[in-house]
Image (cartoon, rainbow, N blue to C red):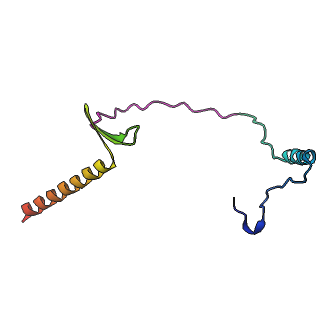
């Protein structure tokens, strides 16, 4: 990939022109590979127990559809939208949040 100053960085070259001698060199290099040790025993796998707690009711779910649209599900209804729709929803929620802050500040005065 990178060939800084023409160095091969451990890459072997087999270009003698004789295919039989190149294959023999490759075969001897393949024999130099470090072998993994044989397994003597395998540790036991611990048993996995299912959680006993009830996570309760799901009120909403947010995710992606197969065609990369954002899907918001609430109870039995679902809304899916593209990225422009998501950005519009975010802008509307930020505006609503700023209105709530202004109303809270007016009530405190």
Instruction: Using the rendered view, name the quadrant where residue 61 is placed.
Output: top left
Q: Against 27, is 97 above or below?
A: below
In this view, the residue in front, 53 or 96, is 96
Q: Against 49, is 30 above or below?
A: below
Q: Quadrant of the N terminus?
A: bottom right
Q: Against 77, is 8 above or below?
A: below
Residue extending furthest bottom?
A: 5
Task: Where is residue 105? Give x, y as percent.
Answer: 11, 63
Task: Where is residue 84? Give x, y as percent.
Answer: 30, 50
In the displayed structure image, the side of residue 102 where residue 65 appears, left or right: right
Q: Which residues are magenta?
A: 42-59
In the displayed structure image, the side of residue 77 where residue 47 appears, left or right: right
Q: Is residue 48 magenta?
A: yes
Task: Where is residue 65? Give x, y as percent.
Answer: 38, 38
Q: Against 35, is 16 above or below?
A: below
In the displayed structure image, the side of residue 12 where residue 72 appears, left or right: left
Name the residue rendered at 86%, 52% in the picture: 14
């Amino acid at each position: 990939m990178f060939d800084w100053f023409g160095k091969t960085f451990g890459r072997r070259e087999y270009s003698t022109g004789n295919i039989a001698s190149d294959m023999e060199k490759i075969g001897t290099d393949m024999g130099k590979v470090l072998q993994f040790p044989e397994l003597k025993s395998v540790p036991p796998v611990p048993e996995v127990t299912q959680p006993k707690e009830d996570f309760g009711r799901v009120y909403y779910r947010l995710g992606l559809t197969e065609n990369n649209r954002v899907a918001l599900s609430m109870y039995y209804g679902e809304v899916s939208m593209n990225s422009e729709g998501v950005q519009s929803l975010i802008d509307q929620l930020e505006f609503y949040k700023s209105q709530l802050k202004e109303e809270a500040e007016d009530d405190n005065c």
